[in-house]
Image (cartoon, helix red, strand yellow):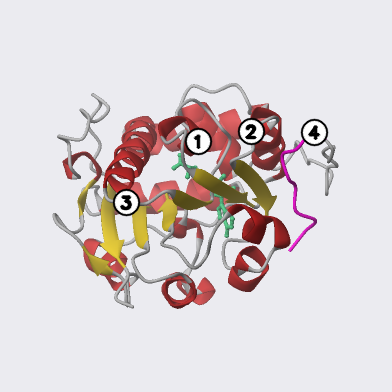
Amino acid sequence: MDEPIRASKDNPFRPVAEIDESVPSVARVYDYALGGSHNFAVDRALAERVFKVVPGYRDFAHANRSFLRRSVLWLREHGIHQFIDLGSGIPTVGNVHEIAPDAKIVYVDRDLIAVTHSHMILRGHDNAIVLQAEASDIDGILGHEDVRDLLDLSQPVGLLTVAVLHFMSDDDDPAGVLAGYHDALAPGSMLAMSHASGDDLKPDMTAAAVSEFKLGSVSVTPRTADEVEGLLGPWRAVEPGLVRLDEWHPEVEPPAQRKSSHGYAVVAESTR
Ligand SMILES: C[S@@+](CC[C@H](N)C(=O)[O-])C[C@H]1O[C@@H](n2cnc3c(N)ncnc32)[C@H](O)[C@@H]1O
């Protein structure tokens, strides 16, 4: 894992890599889709090409962010007071520490811009830190001193993988990653996951979107409902199970008004 970045006054931010403005980043493409301003021309160009082949991509981004909010509110109601947000992205509005201000949060992303902005936003917050890491680096993340200082890993954790696992191919073994966290986190922990899917798109639209992302050096693996469910492994889905993004507990808070069926959402509990 790269040098972790902790949001505190006495630990000034040091970039761990140069930002290459000629290569698009999913964090910034997603930021652009949400209407954010932390993106470069190369990100906007890729996003616009994806909007052309999948006009609902913007809706997916909003529906996804809305699911993040509802799932955190729901998890809080169900006794979760500490979160690990894998692939947390560029902090637009509605970050976990704003949704659950009394909770402790570890944000994790591999993208330097996402981590830099998170660091700036978290300055002065004692209950949230950000690490630049690969989500799959379970030991590096859970074993990190700052994570151990902030979270009580003997207590349940809410693990968030919101719109991130479709950036892992089957070779990256996302199911193995989720199983690894399951076994490492305390009983009572819960998982909130959302995932892109082509189930409601014509196959050529999905293929065109994947190919546009690939041309932009971004590998995306949309999965069917069965495949997404297959990632859960030892995690057991709680009611209502795996559903389309807008169908997941809409009573918690009305979902983003735009409709999107380009993704699935599920919350699951540990079986430890
Ligand atoms: C589409 S954004 C989702 C952001 C946020 N979770 C949300 O739903 O609003 C995906 C984020 O996951 C990050 N990401 C993708 N693969 C990752 C990996 N293997 N490890 C850590 N971060 C990853 C990207 O850098 C990006 O910021």
Identify the residue position indicated by label 2 in the image: 125
Residue 9: image tag: 4
Residues under numbered marks 1 and 4 in contact, where contact means CB atoms less than 8 Å apart: no
Q: Nearer the viewer, residue 111 or 153?
A: 153
- Predominant SS of the magenta segment: loop
Report how far apart the C-alphas of labels 1 and 2 lie in the structure. Answer: 9 Å
Secondary structure type for disc 2: loop
Question: x%, y% of residue 109?
Answer: 61, 50
Identify the residue position indicated by label 3 in the image: 79
Q: Residues within 10 Å of mark 2 (few under 14, many from 20)?
A: some
The N terminus appears in which quarter of the rendering?
Answer: bottom right
Residues under numbered marks 1 and 2 in contact, where contact means CB atoms less than 8 Å apart: yes
The C terminus appears in which quarter of the rendering?
Answer: bottom left
Relative horizontal placement of residue 121, taking residue 168 as reference (left or right):
right
Of the residues tagged 1 and 3, which is closer to the observer?
Answer: 3
Q: Earlier in the sequence, mark 4 or mark 2?
A: 4
Is residue 252 located in the magenta-colored stretch of the structure?
Answer: no
Q: Residues within 10 Å of mark 4 (few under 14, many from 20)?
A: few
In the rendered structure, which amino acid carries the disc numbered 4? Lys
Task: Tell me where the magenta segment starts and ends, as one range.
Answer: 1-9
Check the image and report above or below for 132 versus 145: above
Check the image and report above or below for 204 versus 29: below
Residues under numbered marks 1 and 3 in contact, where contact means CB atoms less than 8 Å apart: no
Report how far apart the C-alphas of labels 1 and 4 lie in the structure. Answer: 18 Å
Question: x%, y% of residue 82?
Answer: 47, 51
In the rendered structure, which amino acid carries the disc numbered 1? His
Report how far apart the C-alphas of labels 1 and 3 lie in the structure. Answer: 16 Å
In the rendered structure, which amino acid carries the disc numbered 2? His
